Amino acid sequence: MADWIEILKEQTATGDQMGRDVPQMLANPDISEAQVKTLFAALEKQADFAEKLRLALEKFGHDFPIIKAAERLEERYADLAASVAEKLKAIRNQSNAGKI
């Protein structure tokens, strides 16, 4: 049986690191549209995994603080994905502005 608490701890550490890394990546003026798309897809995948993890924790009857931690992780990835989506939109707007 999976150690859901350990998985949550590992994923939370990864989420914390992504919370530091993603803004730095997005601040890089040389980041390409392809890189932003790849980052968005990776964050969406992590958000989906965090949701499945939360559902598993609920299913196996873990305490509310554990479920809440999983919800925060899920929200962190969703927020990071939203910031990446905004960057992608800005890149596309810049690209389209240059064509006019």
Image: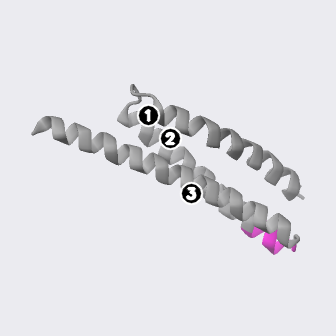
Residue 35: give its label.
1
Three-letter amino acid code of the residue under disc 1: Gln
**Residue occupying image coordinates x 41% and y 29%:** 31
Label of residue 39 in the image = 2
Confirm or deny contact between disc 2 and disc 1 (CB under 8 A): yes
Q: Is 91 on the left-hand or right-hand side of 48?
A: left
Query: Mark number for residue 78?
Result: 3
Q: Principal SS element in the magenta part?
A: helix
Could you tell me which quadrant the C terminus lies in? Answer: top left
How dense is the environment of label 1, judged by Cα within 10 Å: few (below 14), some, or many (20 and up)?
some
Rendered-image quadrant of the N terminus: bottom right
Left or right, 11 with respect to 100, comes to right
Q: Residue at x 32, y 40 (%)?
A: 91
Q: Residue at x 25, y 44 (%)?
A: 93
Distance from label 2 to label 1 (Cα)? 6 Å
Where residue 3 appears, as percent x and y from the top left, is 89, 55
Nearer the N terminus, badge 2 or badge 3? 2
Mark 1 or 3, nearer chain start: 1
Q: Where residue 84 sits: x, y (%)?
A: 46, 46
- Locate residue 32: give its quadrant: top left
10 Å neighbourhood of mark 2: few (<14), some, or many (≥20)?
Answer: some
Magenta residues? 55-61
Is residue 56 highlighted in magenta? yes
Q: Is residue 74 visible?
A: yes
The stretch drawn in magenta includes residue 17 = no
The kind of residue tagged 2 is Leu
Check disc 3 and give the amino acid type.
Answer: Ala
What kind of element bears circle 2?
helix
Q: In which quarter of the image is residue 23?
A: top right
Can see residue 2?
Answer: no
**Is the Cβ of the residue at disc 2 closer than 8 Å to that at disc 3?**
no
The nearer-to-camera label among 1 and 3 is 3
